[in-house]
Amino acid sequence: MLIGFLNTQMRPYRRGLSALVVLQLVQTSASLLLPTLNAAVIDHGILQGDVEYIASVGALMLGVAVIQILTASGAVVLAARCAARLGRDLRRRVFRRVLALSAREVGDLGAPSLLNRTVNDVQQVQNIVLTTADVAVPAVVMCLGGIVLAVFQDVAVSLVIVVLVVVVIAALAVTLGRLGPLYTRMQRSVDRIGHLLRERISGVRVIRAFVRDDHERARFDRTNAELSEAALRVGRIMAGMPVMVTIVMNILTVVIIWISGRRIDDGEMPLGALTALLTYVTLIIVSIIMAVMVFSEGSRAAVSAGRIQQVLDTRTSVPAPRRPVRALAAPGEVELRGATFGYPGAEKPVLRDVDLAVRPGQTVAILGSTGSGKSTLLNLVLRLYDVTAGTVRVHGVDARDIDPALLSRTVGHVPQRPHLFSGTVASNLRFGRPDATDAELWQALEVAQAREFVDRIGLDAPVAQGGANLSGGQRQRLAIARTLVRRPAVYLLDDCFSALDHGTEARLRAALASELSGATVLLVTQRVEAAENADHVLLLDDGRVIGSGTPDRLSRDNPVYREIALSQPVHQEVR
Ligand SMILES: Nc1ncnc2c1ncn2[C@@H]1O[C@H](COP(=O)(O)OP(=O)(O)OP(=O)(O)O)[C@@H](O)[C@H]1O
C-alpha cells in the first residue's frame, strides 16, 4: 500500500530522489571503504613497517572521509526538501478534495477524521519519506555492501554472518507484521479522541449546565485509555527489538573472534581482516536496527497512506456536470418538479413530489412543522444534495447541469445556524465579494439591521472563530448582510430571523422586501406572520406539500395553515 502510494505521489520529485539515492550510495560506499582501507594499513603498513604506505593510504582515507561528509550533508538537504514538498502537495490535494466533497461525504468521513488525515496522516507520510531517504537507503546499502566486503575479507566467516543476519531479518519481519493492526487501532483512537474533544469542547457549557462532567470525563478516559493501550503494546514490541539485536550481535562477535582466531593461528586469514570483519558486523547490525526503525514507522505510515488515499479516492455525490452551463440567460425562476429526496440510509424520503415555481420578484415562504423538510428543500436548490427523483431548475436549467461556481454565484444562502470565520466584521462581509466597497458593506448592514451595532464596534472589529464573540442575533444579521453584499439573483433564507426580537425582525423583513424586490426569494420560516407578507406559501408536512397558494387563499381554504396561524400569538395580535 505504502509503496504504491508513494510511487504515485512522489512522481514529481523523481529527479531529486534519484540524485538523493546517488548521494547516499556514494556516502555509504565511502563509509564501507574505510574499514577495508584500515585493514590494509594494518596488514601492509603497520605489520610490514611501511610508513610510506601508511601515509598514502591514510591520505586516501582522509579524502574518502571528506567525500562521505559532503555527500551525506547533500543527501540530508535533498531528503528534507523532497519530504517537505511532498507534505505540502499532499495537504493541498487532500484539502482540495475535501472542498470538492458534498455534505454527505464530509458527514460520512467525519470532520475530525478529515482534520487528522490532512495534518497528522500527511505528517506521518512525510516523516517516512524523510527517514527512508536519510536512514533506510544507506542502511540497506550498508548491509548489502558490508556483507560483500566481508566476503572479500574472509568467505568462511562471512557465511556465518549471512546466516545470522537472515535469521534476524526473518524474526524482525514477523514482529513488524504485528504492528500494522495496532497502528490502525491507534489512528482510529486518535480520530475518536478528536471527535470527542471537538464535540465536547464546543458543548462544554451544556455539559456543565447538565452536571455531566463526571460522565464526560469517564467517557474521555475510556477513549484515551484505548489509545495509550495500543501505544503501549507497540512500545512493548519495539522494546524487544534492540534486546534481540544486541544478543545476536554479541553472539556474532564471539563467533567471529572464535573462528577468526583459529584461522589466523592456522595462517589462513590476516590479522587486519579480523578488525575489518568486526567493523562490518557492527555496520551490518546497526544498519539492520536502522532499517527496522524505519520499517516500523513504515507500518504506521502505511495506515496513514491508506487513510489519505481513501479521501483522495472519495468522489462527490454531487458531481460537476461534464458539459457545464457557464452562463444563465437572465434571472429566471427557481422551479422544483416532482422533487424527491432521501438521506442515505434513511428508510423513507424526507421530501416527496414537491412542485414549486418562484419567479424573480417573488417571495415564497416555506412553512411547516419542525423536521418537515424545509431546510432540505433549500439544500436541493443549493445542490448540497441532488434530488433522487424529479428536477430542480434554476433560471430554466437543471441545477445538475450548471457550472458549480456559477450556481454558487447565482444562489445566495443564509443558513439556519450561520457560520462566521475568524477575522474582522469587514473580512466576513467581503467573504463572497472581496472587492466590495465600504459603502456597499454599510448599505448591506443597513438592510440587515446591523448598522447600529457595527457602528459601535467598527468594520474592523475582530470576529472570533465561528462568530463566538457575537450574539446569536448579531451573527444572523451579519450572515444576512454577507449574502446581500454578493447580490445573488436567488436568495435562500433559512429561518434566519429566529434569534431576532419581534421588532427587529419586522424592520428587517420590511427592508429586505424593498431591497430584494427584483430577486427570487425562498424564505423558510416558522412564523405565519412572515408567511403572510410573502407572495406565495408552500406548506410542508412530513416532506409532502399539503398546501400551496397565496397566504389569503391558504388562510381561507387550508385548515392546517389556519391552525398554525391561530396557534401563534404574534399573528393573533396582528389580526
Ligand atoms: N444530514 C442528514 N442526514 C440524515 N437525515 C437528515 C439530515 N439532515 C436532516 N435530516 C432529516 O431530514 C428531515 C428534514 O430535516 P430538515 O432539516 O430539512 O427539516 P426542517 O423542516 O428544516 O426542520 P427545522 O424547522 O427543525 O429546521 C428530518 O427528519 C431530519 O432528521
Image (cartoon, rainbow, N blue to C red):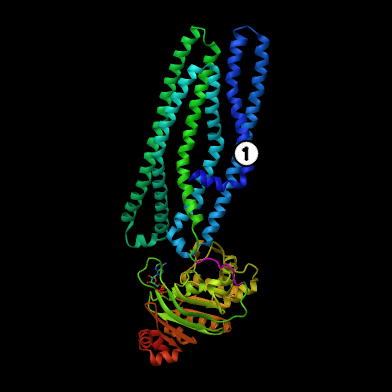
Region rendered in magenta: 318-325
Please name the residue that numbered disc 1 is placed on.
18
Q: Nearer the viewer, residue 519 or 152?
A: 152
Q: Quadrant of residue 200?
A: bottom left
The answer to whether the residue bearing label 1 lies less than 8 angstroms from the nearest atom of ligand 1 is no
Q: Position of residue 537 (x, y in %)?
A: 45, 85
> Image quadrant of ligand 1?
bottom left
> Residue, x 57% and y 19% (percent of image)?
35
Q: Is residue 320 magenta?
A: yes
On screen, 284 above or below 514? above
> Residue, x 52% and y 47% (percent of image)?
5
On screen, 476 above or below 192? below
Q: Position of residue 281 (x, y in %)?
A: 50, 22
Q: Nearer the viewer, residue 104 or 372?
A: 104
On screen, 336 above or below 44? below
User: Mark 1 is on which residue type?
Assistant: Ser
Q: Quadrant of residue 518?
A: bottom right
Q: Position of residue 526 (x, y in %)?
A: 41, 79
* Prevailing secondary structure of the magenta residues: loop
Q: Position of residue 88 (x, y in %)?
A: 58, 49
